[in-house]
Image (spheres, grey):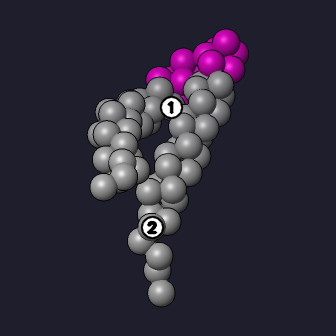
C-alpha cells in the first residue's frame, strides 16, 4: 500500500532531480554555444523555459504539502 506521508518527500526529491538536470542542460548549452552551435544552444535553452515556468508552482505546492497540519 502507498504511504501518502512519503509523497511530499518524494516530490521534493523529484524536484531536486529536475533542477539538477536543468543545471546540467545549461552547462551543455553553454559548452555548445562556446563551440559555435548557436542553433542547438537556442533549442536547449528553449526546453529550459518550461522548467523555469513551472518552478514557482512546484515550490508553492511542495511547501503546502510539507506544512504540518
Which residues are the magenta region?
A: 30-43
Indicate which disc residue 55 carries: none
Residue 64 lies, with reference to residue 27, above or below; the image says: below
60 to the left or right of 46: left
Q: Is residue 41 visible?
A: yes
- The residue singled out by tag 2 in the image is 5
Q: Residue at x 45, y 32 (%)?
A: 48
Residue 24's image quarter? Answer: top right
Where residue 39 appears, as percent x and y from the top left, is 50, 23
Residue 30 lies, with reference to residue 19, above or below; the image says: above
- The residue singled out by tag 1 in the image is 44
**Residue 33 magenta:** yes
Residue 31's image quarter? Answer: top right
Name the outermost residue toward the bottom.
Answer: 1
Where residue 69 appears, as percent x and y from the top left, is 30, 55
For the residues labelled 2 and 1, say whether their Cβ atoms are less than 8 Å apart. no
Mark 2 → mark 1, Cα distance in angstroms = 36 Å
53 to the left or right of 6: left
Q: Residue at x 33, y 33 (%)?
A: 56
Nearest the viewer among 6 and 27 is: 6
Where residue 1 appears, as percent x and y from the top left, is 48, 87
**Secondary structure of residue under mark 2:** helix
Nearest the viewer among 32 and 3 is: 3
Amino acid at each position: 500500500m502507498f504511504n501518502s506521508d512519503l509523497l511530499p518527500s518524494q516530490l521534493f526529491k523529484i524536484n531536486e532531480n529536475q533542477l539538477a538536470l536543468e543545471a546540467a542542460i545549461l552547462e551543455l548549452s553553454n559548452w555548445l554555444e562556446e563551440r559555435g552551435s548557436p542553433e542547438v544552444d537556442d533549442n536547449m535553452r528553449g526546453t529550459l523555459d518550461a522548467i523555469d515556468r513551472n518552478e514557482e508552482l512546484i515550490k508553492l505546492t511542495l511547501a503546502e504539502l510539507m506544512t504540518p497540519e
